[in-house]
Amino acid sequence: MTTPATTLPRLGVGLGWRTEIDTVVERLPGLDWVEVVAENLCAGHLPESLRLLRERGVTVVPHGVSLGLGGAGLPEPARLARLAEAARALGSPLVTEHLAFVRAGGLEAGHLLPVPRSRDSLRVIAENVRIAQDQLPVPLALENIAAQLAWPEDELTEGQFLAELVERTGVRLLIDVANLHTNRVNLGVDPAAELDRLPLEAIAYVHVAGGRLVDGIWHDTHAHPVTGPVLEVLAELCSRVSPPGVLLERDGNFPSPAELGGELDAIRRVLEGVPQHV
Amino acid sequence: MSEGLEYLARGADAELVLARAALARRQGALLAALVAGGPPPPGFDPEQVRAQATGLAAKRRDTVAKVVPELPQLLGPAFGPLFLRYARQRPQDGGYRADGNAFARWALADEAGDPLGPEHRRALEGWLAPAGTRVPAQRSGPLDRLRRALRPQQD
């Protein structure tokens, strides 16, 4: 087993930084850190708001969405270089991406798609992860995704596949509890069983996000309030391990600062072990 | 895989090279089904593939509407259904602003089955062509179509 070479920092409770809510993020009391979508950054021209947060000592973690480490091709050097530059420019302790493919055969998905979880693709993706780790100045963590379809090739669950990647490459994990909930509703995957399969010590941080149920399908919108079942998956995770960080993702239909603060407080209560009344 | 030769020259093992090629084929077939109107690849649940394809098209529509807000403003409620029809026919090729432009040109092109009323047509033409460079609306012969096709894209 590859053991993590460095200890990951305690990040605390954070919020996804977005241009639409930059001043809100700056003023939220008690916010420990932020995450920023790496593709929206230009390392040479950081937004003023992020520079301000950095000056105040707030940790900023770049979160990539288009590297496609679960793809069949080798990771593209230019995309890796951009992610590395973002991490250097922000002085980030780690960068994160997804266990997903986003392009194939000259087509772009514009979204994160699940990989076939076979032994063969495990070897390919482990090599992709190692190549990425070689090019990045800080540790890499991979996130589980919300899927709407299953591959006939699947031999492993996503949790087992991520556990194998951790063992082979030492990659860290970003566990999205909203995605676990999504896969429970849409694909019948038990979040608790998935958590049992994960090497919890490899968790760098946790994502929480809201969504909504339409015609029996859970839509992980990041544009609706966080619901009880998602916080229950967070509580399930926290009953097993104390995660170094938790981050709320909100990408649209932005609520008032007070409402955002309330969602962060609800997350803090789960971390402190206060029972949820949902 | 364009980097294949260099990859082999670096001593990658043959099994891994074959695994990459097989993965590329499978992912290519699935993505073609999701964004380019291809058939669901063998072994997949066609319902799941259809649901994911719908989700991808809706996300593309919403992102274009956010990046190019002029389009939903000009077309109103017609924008959504028309964009989904476009997305089913044309996989995305480039950024979302370019996608918005390509959508407008598609909607104005003859082969779209003239999905626009005259008001929306004028609005989109005005939006695509900067003032003073507009092609008169009544001209639609082969040369005019060619000229429109060759017009530099405003990305």
Image (cartoon, rainbow, N blue to C red):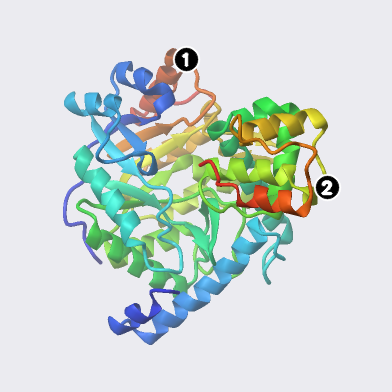
Question: What residue is rendered at 73% in x and 36% in y?
Answer: B136
User: From the viewer's perspective, is B6 left or right of B80?
Assistant: left
Q: Is residue B53 above or below residue A165?
A: above
Q: Which residue is mark 2?
A: B113
Kind of residue at badge 1: Ser
Q: Which residue is mark 1?
A: A256
Q: Position of residue A265 (x, y in %)?
A: 39, 21
Q: Is residue A9 visible?
A: no
Viewer-closest of A184 and B38: B38
Kind of residue at badge 2: Gly
Q: Is residue A251 visible?
A: yes
Chain of the residue displaying label 1: A
Q: Position of residue B22 (x, y in %)?
A: 52, 77
Q: Give the total of numbered labels.
A: 2
Q: Position of residue B155 (x, y in %)?
A: 51, 42
Q: Residues within 10 Å of mark 2 (few under 14, many from 20)?
A: few
User: From the viewer's perspective, is A70 left or right of B33?
Assistant: left
Q: Is residue B108 above or below residue A51?
A: below
Task: Kindly state the secondary structure of the residue where label 1 is placed.
Answer: loop
Question: What residue is rendered at 24% in x and 59% in y?
Answer: A135
Q: Residues within 10 Å of mark 1 (few under 14, many from 20)?
A: few
Question: What residue is rendered at 37% in x and 18% in y?
Answer: A24
**For residue A154, which numbered disc appears in the image?**
none
User: From the viewer's perspective, is B90 left or right of A1?
Assistant: right
Q: Position of residue A116 (x, y in %)?
A: 52, 66
Find residue A37 and report its image quarter: top left
Between marks 1 and 2, how big is the CA–CA gap? 44 Å
Q: Is residue A163 above or below residue A276?
A: below
* Mark 1 or 2: the one toward you: 2
